[in-house]
Amino acid sequence: MTHQAVGFTDISPHARQIIRTMAGEWADRYIGEVLLPDLELIADASGPTLKEVREALMDPYRCLLSFFGHYAFARRGKDRPEYETNACNALRRLASPDDFAEHLKAPDGEALWQAFSDICAERKRKNPEQLNKGIIAGMLELAQEIYSLDAQGSIAGWILSGVLSTSRIEPQFLRIVDIRGVGPKTTSTYLRDMVLLFGIEGQVDNADKLFLQPIDRWIRMIASQIVTEVNIDETVDWVLAGKLNRYTRKSGISGIRFNMGASYFGQKEIRDPARFEQVMEEWFPTIPGMELEDS
């Protein structure tokens, strides 16, 4: 008897179990323990409802505040909290939600950059322009660009309307990642979260869902037990994102929820790459005969 090589349509029961678990309880934990609590700063409420978060994100000022407070400096390590605080305080110093429209009519983001620079100087904090100016001024300039198109200026609203009108999210990805200092992982993470919060994953064209799959080291490690037709270590991020998108879709599982859950599982359970095999065996013990034969 001959067997076909395992492809993305042949997903082992073991792999399906991993996908379901990550997209289930671990996605719930990420949303409940990280995403919604981090967005409290824009909703003016403790434990905000999804409706309150959505309403806050449609406000251009609060939307920008959420980006600075949760996404902009996510890859700055130990410096992250201080940069986030300084950026949010710079926006608050520059404007309030009520008068922010005046700044959305400005020609550039220079005023916000100056406010950020002033705060960093007051706190005696280094502020390398080549690393920070693109993020601070560039994100406001994106909001200004959106305001010139829709008279609203919410970056989240722009993402939402783009998906609803075209089913595509690649244009938004390319525009954001073009901002100096905002890398593809940060961009994908932001788009992923916005799409989940607005409940529009099903409306995103399958070809564009790879832009909603940021690949970190934990997801790459977990993918090694799911994706079978490529060498994970030699597969670039965007190819792996596409593979995971197909595997989750063929499993009938949200790719976004899998991504959130797998990343959070890595941070909370694995913690150290040396523990990967031990932790995965504890959570997903290999049962003889459970794997599909690959020959």
Image (cartoon, helix red, strand yellow):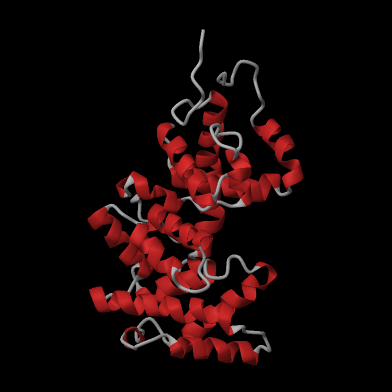
Residue 5 horizontal side relative to residue 276, left or right: left
User: Which residue is found at the position 61% from the left and 37% from the top?
Assistant: 224
Determine the image quadrant of residue 293: top right
Residue 263 % position (x, y): 58, 49
Compared with 251, 147 (above or below) is: below
Q: Residue furthest right?
A: 274
Compared with 126, 153 (above or below) is: above
Quadrant containing the C terminus in the rendered view: top right
| Residue 58 showing in the rendered view | yes
238 or 264: nearer the viewer:
238
Residue 40 horizontal side relative to residue 125, left or right: left
Determine the image quadrant of residue 274: top right
52 or 7: nearer the viewer:
7
Residue 241 % position (x, y): 49, 46
Residue 40 horizontal side relative to residue 198, left or right: right
Residue 15 % position (x, y): 55, 30
84 or 234: nearer the viewer:
234
Residue 82 % position (x, y): 63, 76
